[in-house]
Image: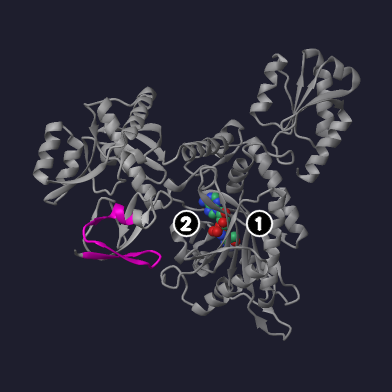
């Protein structure tokens, strides 16, 4: 009997009878969990018969490709359930997506929540029947006839664009759907299903065409996986900074104002001011000098720096006034360089550390704007360090040390460090001085190793002027964003002809380190809101204490307490409404205020307050003085 030779991913080779099903090969190879297999790198159904020598790799749900197939099959199951419940439904397209799958369907009206429940239940039934999913190839004209008879006009339109003489379909339990595949072998493999939402979607994304209904869903091989996923979705919603920002009145956007241009509301501004004061203080103690520079600069400046050539896509177009052309600044570096250049520097003065809460404007594509995480006007906790080549390592290490100190104060422990390197093949974006790149990148490898900071190298992630270390954090929605960044730069000092006078009395070229610890105030705010889920610690809370008098006759005493707390620098508000206390208590709870102080007859007569803490619940009555001390302690320790 003819044989085929199969090579497995571990290098083992085995012979099978020619025409063996991939299902038998992967089972024999000890991969019963396989959903599909790769034959010489191409995904195939497990029912495929092998008639030549090949490399075969089994693919499970654990692999992204396996998941895509699984969710694609789940979309078919969804369509089958819909057709059984709504025979008149017309199917459009149903692909897998990053997280699950959807299907666009026309039933002449939107789906109601009850519809989703019924469909989901039917999907479960279909899965229990555990029917095989088979690939069938049908001549094109037969397929056209089938879909014409069934009135499936969307499928017909898609079919019209397929030139092949035979078209592939997948069939399960009599339900047929045109599809390239591959698919999982049986409906029973789709065990835990949840239909998540519906929305309107235009056919082919064209607003002049039919409005269809899209059903989104997710599915897993095991119920625990679905439960964990749904829990994570809930958590993402609970932490979403856009929702919390609205509810806590921290920031806002307005259509009239333009996209990506946030307004900091009074309460958000309080938090921002604390962050700014905090970081300026920390940096001042470490030898940084804070400056101010204008939001505009001549195009000329950015032509010298290279931003005009390499960063123009992210810049707002220039405006002409008199005989100048001005741009909104997309980065602060050139301004700080001009400040460095303003004076002569001796080797003894270095490093010079110029810092600024520097406002920047960047054109970011509208599709990428997400709340405060990615905006178009922003203020960066920026600094540029000008140092001698022999100081680079120590300065770089000091920046990382500073970053670690700051992260401790905010209890940030969940992050990943990336070393972003240039891509030697990308000659468009990166300057061509290979030697400069090698020096800079070699140095960063060394520093990170010495600091024992684990990192992932990323080729092609560097800025046009040099390699960098980026600290990646996760948003509530699960996306990774850069928070802190430390960047090495041998290029700008050269372009701006920067100098210092060395020990030898001659001019030398300094090295630059660009760095941002808190990121932009916007991104940091978004991150912190999600990090704390709105529960800002006392030192950051926009409102630290809410005073709640039980009745109007306690108002005077409450005012007295408020004034004392305010006198100690506390951010305190007094509820003067005449609502009942049970009702008053709800507001500060919803607004995540860390402390509520209730005052009634007993408290007023004894100079006390009844304390309720957001985190520890009812703390009972205590003298005003004791409360002042307690909260002051929390502020200084940043607990
Ligand atoms: C560190 N010249 C350097 C600076 O000296 C610089 O601008 N680097 S940057 O381009 O990487 O930006 C610094 C940080 O700003 C990023 O790491 C990121 O945290 C933040 N940031 C960048 N773009 C945006 C944006 N559109 N919205 C919010 N924050 C942003
Ligand atoms: Zn910079």
Tell me the number on the disc at residue 315.
2
Q: Check the picture and name the quadrant holding the N terminus.
A: bottom left
Residue 496: in sight, yes or no? Answer: no
- Tell me the element at label 1: strand
- Residue at the spot x=64%, y=27% of the render? 590
- Answer left or right for 425 relative to 4: right
Q: Residue 357 in magenta?
A: no
Which of the marked residues, 2 or 1, is nearer the chain's N terminus?
2
Residue 267 visible at all: yes
Tag 2 secondary structure:
loop
Task: Tell me, for residue 635, which label it has, or none.
Answer: none
Which residue is found at the position 21% from the left and 35% from the top? 174
Q: Position of residue 246 (x, y in %)?
A: 57, 33
Return the residue at label 1: 356
**Ligand 1 found in image quarter:** bottom right
Label 1 CB, ligand 1: below 8 Å? Answer: no
Q: Residue at x 34, y 30 (%)?
A: 125
Q: Are marks 2 and 1 in contact (CB under 8 Å)?
A: no
**Front-lying residue, 492 or 39:** 39
Q: Which residues are magenta?
A: 3-26
Q: Position of residue 106 (x, y in %)?
A: 26, 30
Q: Is residue 57 above or below residue 255?
A: below
Where is residue 176 shown, x and y percent of the image?
A: 21, 38
Where residue 594 appears, x then y in whole percent?
A: 72, 33
Q: Quadrant of residue 312?
A: bottom left
Asked if residue 18 lies left or right of residue 575, the reply is left
- Lateral position of residue 221 relative to residue 247, left or right: left
15 falls in the magenta region: yes
Tell me the CA gap for discs 2 and 1: 20 Å
Using the image, determine if residue 171 lies above or below residue 620: below
């Amino acid at each position: 009997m003819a044989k085929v030779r199969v090579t497995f991913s571990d290098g083992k080779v085995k012979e099978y009878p020619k025409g063996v099903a991939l299902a038998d090969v992967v089972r024999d190879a000890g991969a019963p969990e396989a959903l599909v297999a790769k034959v010489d790198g191409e995904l195939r159904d497990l029912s495929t018969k092998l008639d030549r020598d090949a490399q075969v790799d089994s693919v499970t749900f654990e692999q992204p490709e396996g998941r895509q197939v699984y969710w694609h099959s789940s979309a078919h199951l969804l369509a089958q359930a819909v057709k059984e419940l709504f025979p008149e439904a017309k199917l459009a397209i149903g692909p897998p997506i990053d997280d699950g799958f959807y299907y666009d369907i026309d039933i002449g009206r939107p789906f109601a929540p009850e519809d989703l429940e019924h469909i989901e239940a039917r999907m479960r039934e279909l899965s229990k029947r555990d029917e095989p999913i088979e690939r069938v190839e049908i001549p094109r004209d037969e397929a056209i006839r089938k879909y014409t008879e069934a009135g499936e006009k969307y499928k017909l339109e898609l079919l019209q664009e397929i030139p092949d003489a035979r078209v592939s379909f997948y069939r399960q339990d009599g339900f047929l759907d045109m599809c390239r595949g591959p698919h999982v072998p049986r409906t029973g493999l789709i065990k835990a299903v949840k239909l998540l939402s519906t929305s309107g979607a235009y056919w082919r994304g064209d607003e002049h065409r039919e409005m269809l209904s899209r059903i989104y869903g997710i599915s897993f091989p095991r119920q625990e996986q679905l439960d964990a996923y749904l829990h994570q979705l809930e958590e993402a919603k609970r932490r979403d900074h856009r929702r919390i920002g609205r509810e806590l009145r921290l920031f806002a956007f307005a259509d009239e104002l333009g996209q990506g241009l946030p307004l900091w509301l009074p309460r958000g501004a309080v938090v921002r001011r604390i962050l700014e004061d905090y970081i300026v203080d920390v940096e001042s103690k470490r030898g940084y000098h804070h400056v101010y520079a204008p939001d505009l600069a001549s195009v000329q400046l950015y032509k010298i720096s290279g931003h005009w050539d390499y960063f123009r896509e992210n810049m707002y177009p220039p405006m002409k006034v008199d005989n100048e052309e001005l741009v909104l600044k997309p980065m602060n570096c050139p301004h700080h360089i001009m400040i460095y250049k303003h004076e002569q520097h001796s080797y003894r003065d270095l490093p010079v550390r110029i810092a600024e809460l520097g406002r920047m404007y960047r054109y970011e594509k509208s599709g990428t704007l997400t709340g405060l995480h990615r905006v178009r006007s922003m203020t960066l906790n920026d600094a540029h360090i000008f140092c001698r080549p022999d100081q680079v390592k120590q300065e770089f290490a000091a920046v990382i040390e500073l970053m670690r100190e700051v992260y401790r104060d905010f209890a940030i422990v969940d992050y990943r460090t990336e070393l972003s390197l240039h891509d030697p093949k990308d000659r468009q974006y990166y300057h061509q001085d290979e030697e400069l790149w090698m020096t800079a990148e070699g140095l960063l490898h060394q520093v990170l190793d010495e600091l024992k900071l684990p990192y992932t190298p990323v080729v092609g992630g560097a800025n046009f002027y040099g390699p960098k270390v980026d600290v990646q954090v996760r948003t509530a929605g699960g996306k990774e964003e850069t928070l802190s960044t430390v960047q090495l730069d041998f290029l700008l000092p050269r372009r701006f002809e920067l100098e210092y006078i060395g020990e030898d009395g001659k001019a030398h070229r300094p090295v630059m380190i660009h760095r941002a610890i808190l990121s932009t105030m916007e991104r940091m705010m978004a991150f912190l809101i999600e990090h704390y889920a709105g529960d800002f610690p006392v030192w950051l809370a926009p409102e630290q204490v809410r005073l709640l008098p039980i009745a109007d006759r306690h108002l005077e005493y409450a005012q007295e307490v408020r004034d004392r707390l305010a006198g100690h620098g506390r951010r305190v508000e007094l509820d003067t409404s005449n609502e009942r206390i049970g009702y008053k208590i709800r507001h500060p709870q919803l607004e995540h205020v860390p402390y509520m102080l209730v005052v009634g007859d007993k408290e007023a007569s004894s100079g006390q307050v009844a304390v309720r803490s957001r985190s520890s619940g009812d703390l009972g009555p205590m003298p005003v003085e004791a409360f002042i001390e307690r909260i002051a302690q929390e502020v200084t320790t940043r607990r």
